[in-house]
C-alpha cells in the first residue's frame, strides 16, 4: 500500500489480521463511518479506543496507528465530499457474491455500533428519514441471504450497496450540519 494513496479494503483487512481485532474489515470501516457520521471525532486520534476495539494482546505499531489516522481522515473527507464520492469499503467485485453480501451486513452492523458510540444529542432529534435509514440499516445488519439467481442477486446487492452509501451520506449531513444560529455565540 502506498503511503499516499487511498486506503482500500485489503489494507484494512491486513490491519485487522495484524492486530487481531476480532472484527471484519468492512465492519471496522462501517464502525468508523458511523462514528464520524454521528458527529463524533476520536479524542487524541485514538480510533481503536473510540470504537472500543482492542487487539488480542497485540499493540498497534506506529505504522498501524498512522494507517488508522489516515483512514479516519479519508472517511471524514469522503463523507463530507460535496460530489458524494463516498463508498463503503467492501471486497472487490471479483469476490464471490456471498462474501460481498456478508460484508454489506458487517458494514451496516459496524455503522450502527459506531453511530451509537457517537452518542450525540443530535440523535434525539433525527428526522423521520434519518430514523428510517437507521431502521433499514438494522434490518440489513440482521439479514442473511439466500442466493437463487446470480444476475438478480447481483443487481439486488448493487441496489442495497447504493442505499447504504446514500444513507450514510444523509446521516452524516444531518448530524454534522452546523447550526448557524449558534455559530459565533459565546457561552
Image (spheres, rainbow, N blue to C red):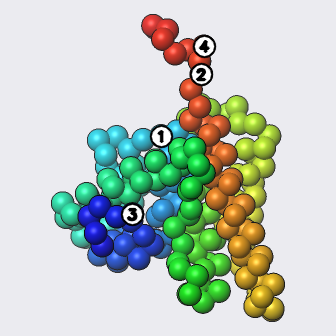
Whole-Å distance between the Cαs marked 4 and 2? 5 Å
> Up-down: is 43 above or below 155?
above
Whole-Å distance between the Cαs marked 1 and 4? 21 Å
Q: State the residue position of label 1.
A: 40
Whole-Å distance between the Cαs marked 2 and 1? 16 Å
Regarding mark 2 in the picture, which secondary structure is present there? loop
Q: State the residue position of label 3.
A: 6
Contact (CB < 8 A) between labels 1 and 4? Answer: no
Say which of 104 and 9 sits in front. Answer: 9
Residue that sits furthest to the top in the current view: 186
Q: Earlier in the sequence, mark 2 or mark 3?
A: 3
Left or right: 163, with 23 as reference point = right
Whole-Å distance between the Cαs marked 2 and 3? 31 Å
Residue at x 54%, y 46% (from the top left corner):
81
Q: State the residue position of label 4.
A: 181
Residue at x 53%, y 44% (from the top left corner):
80
Q: Earlier in the sequence, mark 1 or mark 4?
A: 1
Contact (CB < 8 A) between labels 4 and 2? Answer: yes
Amino acid at each position: 500500500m502506498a503511503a499516499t494513496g487511498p486506503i482500500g479494503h485489503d489494507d484494512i483487512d491486513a490491519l485487522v489480521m495484524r492486530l487481531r481485532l476480532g472484527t471484519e474489515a468492512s465492519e471496522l470501516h462501517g464502525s468508523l463511518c458511523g462514528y464520524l457520521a454521528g458527529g463524533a471525532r476520536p479524542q487524541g486520534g485514538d480510533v481503536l479506543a473510540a470504537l472500543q476495539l482492542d487487539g488480542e494482546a497485540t499493540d498497534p505499531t506506529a505504522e498501524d496507528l498512522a494507517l488508522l489516522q489516515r483512514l479516519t481522515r479519508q472517511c471524514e473527507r469522503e463523507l463530507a465530499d460535496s460530489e458524494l464520492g463516498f463508498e463503503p469499503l467492501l471486497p472487490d467485485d471479483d469476490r464471490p457474491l456471498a462474501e460481498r453480501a456478508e460484508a454489506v451486513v458487517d458494514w451496516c452492523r459496524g455503522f450502527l455500533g459506531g453511530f451509537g458510540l457517537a452518542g450525540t444529542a443530535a440523535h434525539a432529534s433525527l428526522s423521520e428519514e434519518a430514523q428510517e435509514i437507521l431502521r433499514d440499516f438494522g434490518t440489513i445488519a440482521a439479514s442473511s441471504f439466500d442466493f437463487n439467481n446470480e444476475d438478480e442477486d447481483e443487481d439486488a446487492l448493487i441496489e442495497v450497496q447504493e442505499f447504504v452509501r446514500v444513507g450514510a451520506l444523509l446521516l452524516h449531513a444531518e448530524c454534522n450540519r452546523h447550526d448557524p444560529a449558534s455559530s459565533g455565540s459565546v457561552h
